[in-house]
Image: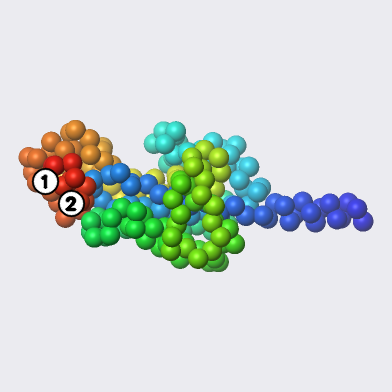
């Protein structure tokens, strides 16, 4: 009997989920901000950690691409959301980021009992329990996995947008305001996917 109890306890522990959410593209001058939420069991957290899941910023492009399908396969659930450049200009980056996070959360099959949010800022529109963790992507596997899912999803979009907006080197700069990108904007002007509010602040339009 004690063995069976222990087995049951192990099963319960392996099913305890960690739900992490993160965003990418917050500081870019082109394109949307992306968010991803990932739900992981304790068992699958360990597997992903062994595969090398960590903060997406510390991983190479190739490693993120390798981990992306593994995360989707091993997550109990996940959601991806975005908020457009137009929404960023209209509402400001914090609200737009929250919009992208809520869109990601709405794609989950069930509302999480607790959400772990990367960074110090509360997800204000979220009515459930949430924990803010500074540098959460280096402390929680679910947040690290969410950061990879958001980053690869946004990079894939940048690759597609490169074809529509050739000349701006979007896939190379990923929509960020590199010196090269900003000098191209001065020469060619802005597209409808550039964040006008960001460029006005830096006196580039």
* Vertical placement of residue 103 versus 11, above or below: below
Compute the Cα span from label 1 to label 2: 8 Å
Q: Position of residue 30 (x, y in %)?
A: 23, 48
The residue at 23%/42% (across/down) is 170
Asked if the residues shown at circle 1 and circle 2 are in contact, with their CB atoms under 8 angstroms apart, the answer is yes
Q: Which residue is mark 1?
A: 205
Which mark is first along the chain, 2 or 1?
Answer: 2
* SS label for mark 2: helix
The residue at 54%/63% (across/down) is 128
Which of the pair 121/185 is nearer the observer? 121
Work out which quarter of the rendered image holds the N terminus and state it. Answer: bottom right
Left/right placement of residue 15 relative to residue 62 reads right
Q: Which residue is mark 2?
A: 196
The residue at 70%/51% (across/down) is 14
Left/right placement of residue 191 relative to residue 89 reads left
Q: Which mark is residue 188?
A: none
Q: Position of residue 156 (x, y in %)?
A: 33, 48
Q: Position of residue 198 (x, y in %)?
A: 21, 47
Q: Position of residue 120 (x, y in %)?
A: 46, 47
Q: Residue 155's quadrant in the figure?
A: top left
* Vertical placement of residue 14 versus 167, above or below: below
* SS label for mark 1: loop
Left/right placement of residue 51 relative to residue 69 reads right
The residue at 55%/66% (across/down) is 110
Which of the pair 139/72 is nearer the observer? 139
């Amino acid at each position: 009997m004690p063995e069976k109890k222990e087995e049951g306890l192990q099963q319960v522990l392996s099913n305890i989920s960690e739900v992490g959410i993160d965003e990418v593209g917050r500081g870019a001058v082109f394109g949307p901000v992306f968010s991803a939420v990932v739900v992981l069991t304790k068992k699958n957290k360990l597997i992903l950690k062994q595969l090398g899941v960590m903060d997406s910023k510390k991983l190479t492009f190739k490693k993120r691409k390798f981990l992306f399908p593994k995360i989707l396969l091993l997550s109990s659930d996940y959601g991806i959301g975005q908020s457009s450049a137009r929404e960023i200009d209209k509402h400001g980056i914090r609200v737009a980021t929250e919009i992208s996070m809520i869109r990601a959360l709405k794609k989950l099959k069930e509302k999480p009992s607790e959400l772990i949010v990367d960074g110090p800022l509360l997800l204000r529109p979220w009515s459930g329990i949430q924990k803010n963790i500074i540098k959460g992507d280096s402390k929680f596997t679910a947040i690290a996995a969410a950061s990879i899912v958001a980053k690869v999803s946004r990079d894939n979009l940048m690759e597609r947008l490169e074809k529509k907006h050739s000349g701006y080197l979007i896939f190379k700069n990923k929509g960020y305001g590199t010196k090269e990108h900003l000098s191209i904007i001065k020469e060619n002007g802005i597209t409808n996917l550039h964040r006008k509010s960001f460029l006005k602040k830096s006196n580039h339009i």
